Amino acid sequence: MKVILTRDVAKLGKSGEMKTVADGFATNYLIPQQLAVPAAGGAYRAWQHDIASREDKRKREREEAEIAATRIASTTLTMGVKVGDGGKLYGSITTKDIADALGRRGITVDRHKIELDEPLKSLGTYKVAIKVASGMTPEVTVIVEPKG
């Protein structure tokens, strides 16, 4: 049975995709849970019409992601921190600190998209990758220096 997914379904597909599934799976699970609609009649025509608008939306999102990636790659963040003996930091620089600093520069980034294995705990210059879109991970330069 052909169905059009109305929501993302794990291990099956994303919202808006047309999939062929077993009749029982469609009638007993996908359709009652409002995860899909049968791909027949009006729903099928509406789905064909939506393909064009989804492509435009994806193209627009991709262009916005490229602009954000360019801005991120050209950004250098200087973080002033308190330093103890031997250049050891009091605390550390986390993904939240980096996201906040980018936010002050007008670049909105979800902190979960910042690829930082562990917090920065010493002085120096670091390149931190930020996942903007699939296949796009620009790096922001973070300089950690003593405050004052």
Image: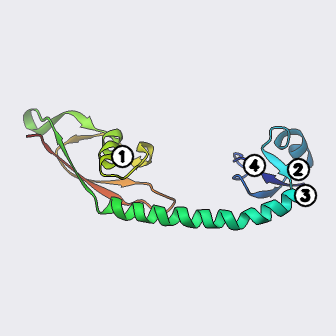
Q: Where is residue 69 in the image (x, y as percent from the top left)?
A: 40, 62
Residue assigned mark 3: 40
Question: In the rendered image, which quarter is residue 24 located in?
Answer: top right
Query: Mark 1 or mark 3, which is nearer to you?
Result: 3
Percent position (x, y) of residue 139? 34, 58
Secondary-structure class at tag 2: loop
Q: In this view, does 32 lie above or below 106?
A: above
Q: Is mark 1 on a helix, strand or loop?
A: loop
Identity of the amino acid at label 2? Answer: Ala
Of labels 3 and 2, the one closer to you: 3
Assess whether mark 3 and mark 4 are in contact (beta carbons under 8 angstroms). Answer: no
N-term mark: 2 or 1: 2
Residue tagged 2? 22
Give the amino acid at mark 1.
Leu
Q: Distance between the residues labelled 4 and 3?
A: 14 Å
Between the C-alphas of marks 4 and 2, the distance is: 17 Å
Indicate whether 7 appears above or below 72: above
Q: Label 4, on which residue?
A: 6
- Earlier residue among tags 4 and 3: 4
Among numbered discs 1 and 4, the one appearing first in the sequence: 4
Q: In which quarter of the image is residue 136?
A: bottom left
Closer to the camera: disc 1 or disc 4?
A: 4
The residue that disc 1 covers is 116
